[in-house]
Image (cartoon, rainbow, N blue to C red):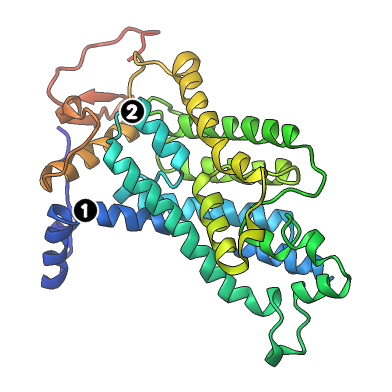
Amino acid sequence: MANEPICLRDVEARPRYMASWERFRHKEAHWLVEMVAEMLGLGATAAFIVGTLTAQSGIGSLYTIGFSYAIGIVLAIGLCAATSGGHFSPGVTITLSLFKGFPKIKAIRYIAAQILGSYLTCLVVYVQWKDLLVALWFFFSIQAAEDVLKEKGVYDTYMFTNVGPAGVFALYVSPGTNLHRVLLNEFVTDFVLGLAICGCLDPTNYFIPPAVGPWVIGLTYAVAIWGYSPTAIAANTARDLGGRLMALTIWGVQASGGPYAAISALTNIPATILAFFVYDLFLGSSTRTLTPYHAEFLRSRMKYHEDNGLHSHQNHSVLKTQYSFDGNDKRMVSADVPKVGLKAGDHA
């Protein structure tokens, strides 16, 4: 027989104030908690650009940017996915709303939270790096990146590009870059990222259990950055819009980004939608069985929603059948249905 599910409250006493807050957030403020989780989901980019402009070696590279984004994605999904589902990208949220029944009202809240989280994060990074990005009179001994551009007479040429201080936050292309190739590069890269996300979300994929999914997604983003960001990629509407709004707040309309702003903000959305469609059409199958790890994960989410009176957009009724592992062959078997003997060569 399968073990009964054990909640954290069954083994760890909760303070009274925390128990009261949990009851409130489950009944009245769950949407707000989900938005905060999405918001929590740049410093390496700042290090790379400052190091390049000020000729300081060892404080940043394209590799540190890729690894930093990868670990950031792993942390965001690992810490917040249990609460919000871990979208962290308007393209993913819109796609799940179109294909997976994710509520449209909740999707709007998620997207707003994602963009706001990106905006606030960029502001925090700006404050952290301001001494090296912007000249301050009481730090006269530090040669800031903007100072270097002004001394060389190239401030207007490079300030609002992918190698300028504003490029830490808003996304730009190098002067003279062909935007048609940038669009192609963005779409193809985002399409591959979308396929990787689909593979991680597929509950029948035995090769990527839930605990591995965040690492696969994070490392896929890192590879995209290492291989294709020199041409220019955004890959996330929230990251782009939040950063661009922050740059507009600090530097004004000259930080708008021109025609490239539309490419960076919008391309990943149709690319992600197409990736989900192609995955369902050619790679996914509704006749494959759920892995035991995914079944356990989905069942725990079902119980969480049921215990707290929360609506779920997924059909979890079939998961009410309790599953256990057969001790001999590690197959997932139903506790409510007698096991059927299998002949050699048969598949469970």
Q: Is residue 129 left or right of residue 52?
A: left
Residue type, numbered disc 1: His
The residue furthest bottom is 138
Q: Position of residue 223 (x, y in %)?
A: 66, 42
Q: Is residue 242 visible?
A: yes
Closest to the observer, 42 or 173? 173
Q: Is residue 59 left or right of residue 72?
A: right
Which quadrant holds residue 50?
Answer: bottom right
Closest to the observer, 184 or 207? 184
The reply to whether dot 2 and dot 1 touch (C-beta < 8 Å) is no
Question: Could you say whether the residue bearing mark 1 is in a helix, strand or loop?
Answer: helix
Q: Which mark is residue 200?
A: none
Q: Position of residue 251 (x, y in %)?
A: 63, 67
Q: Position of residue 171 (x, y in %)?
A: 65, 52
Residue hosting label 1: 30
Q: Is residue 155 above or below residue 218?
A: below
On the rendered image, what quadrant is the N terminus found in? top left
Q: Is residue 340 left or right of residue 27?
A: right
Give the alpha-carbon distance from disc 2 to disc 1, as whole Å. 21 Å
Q: Position of residue 11 (x, y in %)?
A: 16, 60
Residue hosting label 2: 100
Q: Is residue 195 above or below residue 286?
A: below
Question: Could you say whether the residue bearing mark 2 is in a helix, strand or loop?
Answer: loop
Choose the circle earlier in sequence order: 2 or 1. Answer: 1
